[in-house]
Image (cartoon, coloured by chain):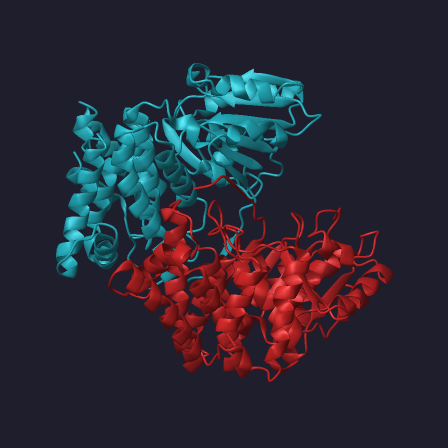
Chain colours: A cyan, B red
């Protein structure tokens, strides 16, 4: 195990019906900004429950946070906060709304142009306004971590920041809220969380860390089992519970503590979203098998471990590792997710801009920082 | 899964050599109380490293915190804090020192007699002085939770309290510090953590929670494998790492979230310590098999799951469950831990005071609150 620091002060309020406890957690005597997305919460009753909880509080609303939230859009919320001396943000939504709220919370008191937060990965943040979360789509884990991914329309970029103060103060995880989700979003959520775990687990290092491995395998087994069942029974609360808790634990820092991580699938995937507007989870499903194929040699051992423990495969290390890649792609297909770039766009030739960007930025990816722009090109070639 | 609230703001600083980072975490401009135990830290070099980290700080020392820390002893530290306007406590030790520090931190500003904290399980605490930890013996998990167990000599009682503010601000988990521990303490540490996991896992409920189960099984497998190896190679850092991290995760609230728990072994064990001064971990090893035998019917299913996944047993549910009890007791023996009351005392007849006490207090134990004083008597009979 490598050395690590683990810190996660978010209070989780978990369980069917826990949304009814929201009012207990909202601070009093603070002007509040209520942030949410496209308004689906108005159809499924969540909005009304939140408004009830805000009864007696001074609050204003900011709706319309987009999937892949943009700097341009969020800066309007920042202005709103400044004008209204907002002291607390309540984010009601999935990863996009939560990530957006984190950016707004960090930007309000930022003295320079807040885009700098993304350019410096949050290093110069001084104050983050406190915020809380009502999670409506389990997927990104943003409800229990301090990271945020924000896009900039003008430059078609997608960047990341994190900060010690950028943990939600609380997150309400009420499995009842997922009952009305379309299956497409369930599929995205399951696959997003599944790939999060894999990127902290299928690495090249020989440094064993059986605890983190065992935790990761538990989450993978859970999502692999629950995913297809949920597609057929989206209203089954016990399945939503497992999905929700597994997604949160997939990216709250725990399973990644002290072990190498490979976020190359995310990094390349972000570029696919920026170029083609493909949903985040789907970009991961497209890219991951390519990363594994191109980096097969250094990941073979861990791929085989994954194949044996999670997918119950048998055979030699190489056989199991190869089958694990295939079976993972089949799992994505079984969730209705297509895994080729040309399934999503007719302008596939645009992808060659991606390795170019990585070359310009001098980015090296992967747990050993040995995935250069040429390897990125190879990966993309395999995934057209 | 049941509803739950999970909150754990302790910062973990983990890894071989992490003790060298201590000075970064100690607050400046606060008079500090340094608490430790019998002075073994002066032999193994830890004390000197801590003193170096305190260089430039205003601090006083309180040494001699006992195993099973007592109210009587700790009240002297409380007085010291009050006289010296202590603003931060640094606990250097194992569970006893950390539990003691929690009590002192909660008692300093307590207006009534602080024993009331134990009598009311911490319900009326208003302020807890912030404190940090340098862990020297992985076992109790106190380094990452908000609970504390304190004894009162005068009444031979052992009581528990917890409070939201009673989490350590930070805990330094440096596996190097365990290299000089006597094997007896390693055995106690492993068995203590192992039983902590079992008490949150071997329960009667049919409510499945595969995530918590998988995490618990991972920790059990780790401790079961690492324990006997560490007894032979106490200086092997990779083993200490696993021991340390598993012990912390065993009782930081995570694996117990949303699942039934059965702390009857602890409750009965505490009485054995109070009566016979048997080390805490050893009392657990004595009592646990008895609890499982007396409550066999309602625990059989989970015992079998434990037997299959952790101990690799095969057979019918009943066979595997029975063998799991035997093998667990053998595991304790393999760690050099005796598991009968008369291995520790010639005054076994005193145990009959325990069910009497439980009857007087009207205590019902176990995950279903169905272990009454008569069942406690049965359990003790089996463990003489």
Q: For the view shown, which residue lies furthest in the front direction?
A: B374
Q: Looking at the picture, how far across and down is residue A180, in whole percent?
A: 37, 22
Q: Which of B300 and A171 is in front in this view?
A: B300
The front one of B263 and A184 is B263
Query: What residue lies at 44% left-to-right and 80% top-to-bottom?
Result: B231
Q: How many labels does the image show?
A: 0
Q: Taking the image as drawn, is residue B62 in sight?
A: yes
| Residue B172 visible, this orientation | no
The image position of residue B302, as x and y in percent, is 37, 56
Please tell me which residue is depicted at 47% across the width and 62% down the height of the picture.
B245
Nearest to the observer: residue A138 or residue A271: A138
Q: How far across and down, in percent of the image, does residue B117 sit?
A: 74, 54
Residue drawn 52% across and 80% down?
A: B184
Could you tell whether B64 is left or right of B260 in the image?
right
Question: Above or below — where is B222 with respect to A261?
Answer: below
- Quadrant for residue B161, please give it: bottom right
Q: Residue furthest bottom?
A: B346
- In the rendered image, which quarter contains the N terminus of chain B? top left
Task: Tell me residue B285's x, y (percent).
Answer: 49, 71
Residue A319 left/right relative to B277: left
Quarter of the image where one finds residue A114:
top right
């Amino acid at each position: 195990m490598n050395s690590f620091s683990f810190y996660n002060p978010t209070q989780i309020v978990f369980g069917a019906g826990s949304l009814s406890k929201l009012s207990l957690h909202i601070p009093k005597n603070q002007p509040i900004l209520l942030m949410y997305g496209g308004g689906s919460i108005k159809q499924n009753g969540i909005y009304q429950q939140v408004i009830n909880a805000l009864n007696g509080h001074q609050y204003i609303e900011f709706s319309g946070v987009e999937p892949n939230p943009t700097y341009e859009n969020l800066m309007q919320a920042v202005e709103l906060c400044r004008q209204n001396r907002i002291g607390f943000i309540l984010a009601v939504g999935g990863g996009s709304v939560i990530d957006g709220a984190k950016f707004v919370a960090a930007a309000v008191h930022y003295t320079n142009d807040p885009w700098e937060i993304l350019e410096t990965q949050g290093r110069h943040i001084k104050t983050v306004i406190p915020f809380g979360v009502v999670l409506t789509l389990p997927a990104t884990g943003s409800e229990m971590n301090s990271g945020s991914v924000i896009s900039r329309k003008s430059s078609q970029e997608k960047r990341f920041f994190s900060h010690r103060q950028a943990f939600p103060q609380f997150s309400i995880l009420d499995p009842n809220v997922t009952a009305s989700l379309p299956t497409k979003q369930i599929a995205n959520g399951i696959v997003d969380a599944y790939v999060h775990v894999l990127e902290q687990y299928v690495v090249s290092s020989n440094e064993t860390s059986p605890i983190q491995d065992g935790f990761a395998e538990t989450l993978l087994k859970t999502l692999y089992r629950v995913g297809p069942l949920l597609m057929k029974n989206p209203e089954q609360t016990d399945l939503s519970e497992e999905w929700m808790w597994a997604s949160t634990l997939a990216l709250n820092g725990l399973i990644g503590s002290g072990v190498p991580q490979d976020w190359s699938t995310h990094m390349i995937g972000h570029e696919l979203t920026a170029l083609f507007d493909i949903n985040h989870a789907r970009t991961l499903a497209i890219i991951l098998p390519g990363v594994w194929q191109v980096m097969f040699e250094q990941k073979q051992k861990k791929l085989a471990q994954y194949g044996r423990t999670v997918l119950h495969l048998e055979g030699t290390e190489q056989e199991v590792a190869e089958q694990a890649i295939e079976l993972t792609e089949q799992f994505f297909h079984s969730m209705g997710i297509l895994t080729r770039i040309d399934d999503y766009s007719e302008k596939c030739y645009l992808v060659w801009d991606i390795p170019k960007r990585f070359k310009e930025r001098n980015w090296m990816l992967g747990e050993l920082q040995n995935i250069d722009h040429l390897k990125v090109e190879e990966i993309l070639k395999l995934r057209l």
